[in-house]
Amino acid sequence: WAGMGCQTQTTLDAEELIEMARVKNFDMIILDGKLEGMENVDACRALKSSSKTRNIPVVFITDCKDASLHVRAVKAGADEFIVKPFDVSILSTRIRGVLKTKHLSEEFFSLQSELELKVAERTVEAMEASDAGLFALAKLAESRDWETGQHLDRIRRYCVVLSNQLSKAYDFG
């Protein structure tokens, strides 16, 4: 793995693996061999069920050719499943693909968060502009007809009083 520019940490204990994954910022977890304490499929399921570790890609490497293990691993959330023996160039290509997918996913979620903030900002701006437009129309009506203008001002004051009373009487949060 060092030849691919990767730093590695190893453990044979499933609980230690899950705790390490929660604490450290792993780019990927490769399950190669048996873990002590639980099956690899169960460890994968535990990793994918935690909000802190669910986005870490999990790659299974096994010498077991049983299709049912492959299915169980994928259902548990495995991102890749590689059967031994394998060609190293194929392994490195698939690992790079998993990492690229992870990084693109992270970029997507970052851009999505940015977009949501911008939409919220623009919504506030649009609401403020709408309020300003309505206020301008009310003032225009007021300037054309004194009685209508006074009526609009009274209604505005009643609305302020009513909303203040309602906010004190009920919890709208």
Image (tube, helix red, strand yellow):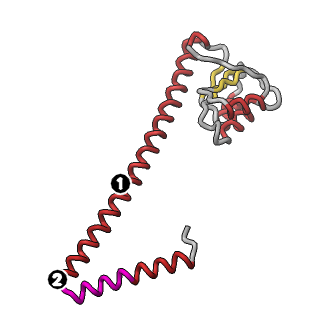
Mark 1 lies on a secondary structure that is helix
Please check the rendered image and state whether residue 151 is part of the magenta-colored stretch, yes or no.
yes
Q: Residue at x 55, y 67 (%)?
A: 173
User: Outermost residue, right direction?
Assistant: 37
Query: Residue 95's spot in the image, x, y percent?
Result: 56, 21
Residue at (40%, 80%) from the top-left corner? 159
Q: Nearer the viewer, residue 100 or 19?
A: 19
Of the pair 89 and 15, the residue shown nearer to us: 15
Front tag of 2 and 1: 2
The residue lying at 66 percent from left, 13 percent from top is 85
Task: Report whether 89 appears left or right of 67.
Answer: left
Residue 133 is situated, as x and y percent measured from the top left of the image, at: 26, 68
Task: Where is residue 70? Give x, y as percent.
Answer: 67, 30
Q: Residue furthest left?
A: 144
* Mark 2–mark 1 CB contact (< 8 Å): no
Which numbered disc covers residue 122?
1
Gap in angstroms between the C-alphas marked 2 and 1: 33 Å
Q: Is residue 27 magenta?
A: no
Q: Is residue 163 above or below residue 120?
A: below
| Mark with earlier residue (2, 1) | 1
The kind of residue on which mark 2 rests is Arg
Identified at 71% across, 26% down, the residue is 66
Give the residue at mark 2. Answer: 144
Magenta stretch bounds? 144-157
Depth check: 48 or 109 in front?
A: 109
Dominant SS type (magenta)? helix
Quadrant of image for the N terminus: top right
Check disc 1 and give the amino acid type.
Arg
Numbered mark located on residue 74 in the image: none
